[in-house]
Amino acid sequence: MDSLEISPHIYSIPAQPAFYTGPQAPNVFLVHDGGEGALVDSGFGDEKSVRVRLDFLKEHAGIKVRYILLTHHHFDHTSGAQQLRKATGARVVLHAGEERFLLDSKSEAPQDLEATAEENKQVAEAIQRFRDQAAEATPDLRVSDGEEFTVGSLTVRVVHTPGHTLGSVCFYMPGEKALFTGDTALGLGTVAISPPPYGDMGLYLESLARLKTYDCALMLPGHGQNVHDVPSKLQELIDHRHEREAQILKLMADGKRTPKAMLSAIYMELDKRIVPMALRQIEAHLAKLEAEGRVARAGDEWVLPG
Ligand SMILES: [Zn+2]
Ligand SMILES: [Zn+2]
């Protein structure tokens, strides 16, 4: 696959998907100016994916990669980071709140891709390998909202956008009016939001609303196509969540009291592999509604108060 010059200061470095499940292959970008560069996410750590990215950097030897900016801990974005760091001497950057999830390769925290119980050992082993690789990418710099990096004459600002994970960040380049959104906003489809303690639907909606206030002409997501009409895209994602929330409240009024019962009413047919993810989405909505006092738990069931 050929790299893509998105703007005079931004390349995309695509690789074939290293894994058959999941929405699309993760995007990896290189921001550069004046002989300096920063990668946004690392992609997968399998040999082929890493090779493609290293070959690209070799062809652009005039760019010294100073940072590997990770949008969040999920292994489709981070498992290549240690190998890329070794090859380039770049420093790995991660939000402080993500570190413990990145380093704990046995963590219960949901990932973007998971093996279901029925899937074969090979898949589970491949996932564990990616998790182990991700755990090697110990951050050199732990960042928080508002911190800035310079790449040549460019500024890259950390925007903390909790929701998909609690330490998810976007990277904003004011000079380019460009926003790297990781899995907070995708180019295609909607992203999985887990219920607390791993994600937070209420915070997610606040994060999307905050991103809408940025002067932004180009959104570069963690998966899928680049987006040019950024405010509309963000509004579409916000609307989708509000619609789903309304749908859940309606289903509850109709007597559906568990995420499972709601799931089969929302989706006619669902790939088995994404059932756990879809259930967590519903739980994430319910947790938000619970925090707002609009639904309540009753044992394993959920009820409307009053
Ligand atoms: Zn992802
Ligand atoms: Zn993710």
Image: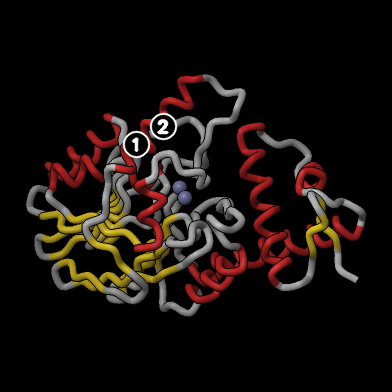
Q: Residue at x 81, y 56 (%)?
A: 302
Q: Give the percent coordinates (x, y) of residue 293.
A: 76, 72
Q: Give the percent coordinates (x, y) of residue 71.
A: 37, 57
Q: Crowdedness of circle 1 by 10 Å Cα count: few (<14), some, many (20+)?
A: some
Task: Give the vertical position of 280 relative to 238 (above or below).
Answer: above
Q: Give the percent coordinates (x, y) of residue 149.
A: 22, 70
Identify the mark at residue 132; answer none if there is no mark.
1
Confirm or deny contact between disc 1 and disc 2 (CB under 8 A): yes
Q: Residue at x 65, y 52 (%)?
A: 281
- Quarter assignment of residue 10: bottom left
The quarter in which the N terminus is drawn is top left
Identify the mark at residue 173; answer none if there is no mark.
none
Q: Residue furthest front?
A: 299
For the residue pair 97 and 40, the one nearer the viewer reads as 97
In the picture provided, is 111 more to the left or to the right than 48? Answer: right
Read off the residue under disc 2.
128
Q: Residue at x 19, y 42 (%)?
A: 56
Report whether residue 224 is seen: no
Report whether residue 66 is seen: yes
Task: Measure how far apart labels 1 and 2 are at the Cα level.
Answer: 6 Å
Q: Residue furthest left?
A: 62
